[in-house]
Amino acid sequence: MIHLKNIRFRYNSRYLLDGLDFRAGNGDRIGLLGPNGSGKTTLCHIIMGLLFPESGEVEIFGKSRKTESDFTEIRSRIGFLFQDADDQLFCPSVLEDVAFGPLNQGKSPEKAKLIATSTLAALKLDGFESRITYRLSGGEKRLVALATVLAMEPEILILDEPTSGLDEDTTERIVELLDKSHLPYIVISHDLEFVSKTTNKIFRMKNR
């Protein structure tokens, strides 16, 4: 599903990624660990076409991806949870935010609303539909941002620090959700216990 070959990416004069190879496919539940600045988020932004490498090849769903237009099609197939929930939430209400993705995929308003409400229920966010997004707590925003990703019914997930700022009960809710999920995923986290519970492969990235 995802194959990066000999990726080099430089920030200013320092290479964050230098000759990196990476694969993720069906059945993979991958954890990415490493200190800040080691390139974890950069790697995932390259997969999504939010950053472009200096050299190397990005192959997603069996096709080489080089230009912005190459990535347009995959962004509805890969569910990407940003590190900052405020980067993902921009509609007035929770229901509008979660229904936004399905509507953009061509679903009818009725179908998009049904998907949104069922996704919120799966995250135990029943009753949040009319809540004002910007008034949510940090943890609530995190869960709603995850709901916006899941509502698009992606083929693979990339979750950047999904438990950041969450209490223990809410973290366990996400562990349970991922355990029941049939989707492959990549998780970036500083929480070794969370990664150990939710992944079957762990890669550690180091500062260069």
Image: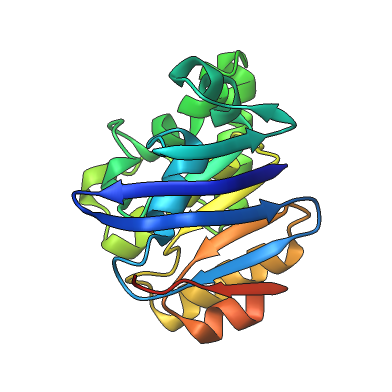
Q: Quadrant of residue 139?
A: bottom left
Give above or below for 15 relative to 104: below
Give above or below for 198 relative to 12: below
Residue at point 69%, 72% (across, down): 201
Here the colouring is rainbow
Q: At which x and y percent is residue 115?
A: 63, 33
In the image, is 65 to the left or to the right of 37? right
In front of the other: 199 or 111: 199
Can residue 180 be seen from the camera position used here?
Answer: yes
Of the 4 image quadrants, the one containing the C terminus is bottom left
Can residue 127 be seen from the camera position used here?
Answer: no
In front of the other: 43 or 17: 17
User: How many numbered discs sit on the rendered protein?
Assistant: 0
Residue at point 32%, 56% (across, down): 15
Q: At which x and y percent is residue 31?
A: 58, 69
In the image, is 112 to the left or to the right of 162? right
Q: Quadrant of residue 79?
A: top right
Q: At which x and y percent is residue 177?
A: 65, 63
Residue at point 63%, 42% (across, down): 118
User: Residue lying furthest bottom in this view?
Assistant: 193
Q: At which x and y percent is residue 55?
A: 46, 38
Q: Quadrant of residue 184?
A: bottom right
Of the 4 image quadrants, the one containing the N terminus is top right
